[in-house]
Image: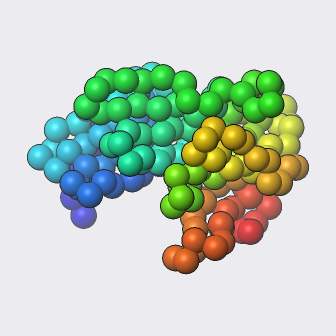
Amino acid sequence: FEKVATGIAFPEGLRIDDDGTLYFSDVMLGGVHARRSDGAVTTIIPDRKWIGGLALDASGGVIASGHGGLWYGHPQTGDARPLLTEIAGAPINAVNDIQPDGKGGLWFGTYDGAGLLAGRAPEAGALHRLDPDGRVTTLADCISMSNGMGTSPDGKRLYHSRTFEGLF
């Protein structure tokens, strides 16, 4: 094993691009970071905390989950901005894990991050799909927290762990 970065409290959302750049978040200390193949580490989206998932897009940008919804950052342009902060007019409390669908869309799971941080029983979250045109479809509700998302090799199935419940 090779140590690739230090000073990280809770790494999540690990993704590697075609150039060998490793993208990761730090749930506790915040930020989306990139470690290039030459060893240099840069920050793409500063300060954003509670990121459980990252996805790489075709433009070279990164989509990050977290409190308040989805964010977008681009390592070359420095662009860092909200991507999706509400569904059907209601603010998104938090998004944990995300998974590209291979067709320009994104699966993502919402959860009650505020409830967890406040120490109360969290309200149920939901599993959603974000289409390339920006439309959001809710696929299942009453989910504690979607986690560990992945698709089958043929793209016909989405697998995800429902934290505290099991694998679906």
Residue 16 % position (x, y): 33, 55
Q: Position of residue 3 (x, y in %)?
A: 24, 52
Q: Nearer the viewer, residue 99 or 129?
A: 129
Depth order, front residue of 30/74: 74
Residue 28 horizontal side relative to residue 20, left or right = right
Which residue appears farthest toward the left when viewing the image?
38
Can residue 10 be seen?
no
Q: How is the image coloured?
A: rainbow
Q: Residue 30, position in %: x, y?
A: 46, 28
Which of the 4 image quadrants contains residue 119? Answer: top right
- Tell whether 26 sits left or right of 165: left
Q: Position of residue 33 (x, y in %)?
A: 34, 36
Q: Is residue 44 above or below residue 109?
A: above
Question: In the rendered view of the protein, which quadrant contains the N terminus?
Answer: bottom left
Q: Is the residue 27 above or below the residue 131 in the image?
A: above
Is 74 displayed left or right of 167 in the figure? left
- Which quadrant does the C terminus fall into? bottom right
Tell me how many marks there are: 0
As drawn, the residue found furthest toward the front would be 133
Residue at 66 percent of width and 72 percent of height: 157
Between 107 and 116, the one nearer to me in the picture = 107
Name the residue: 80% across, 24% down: 89
Q: Residue at x 51, y 61 (%)?
A: 102
Please state which of residues 49 and 119 is positioned toward the viewer in this rendering.
49
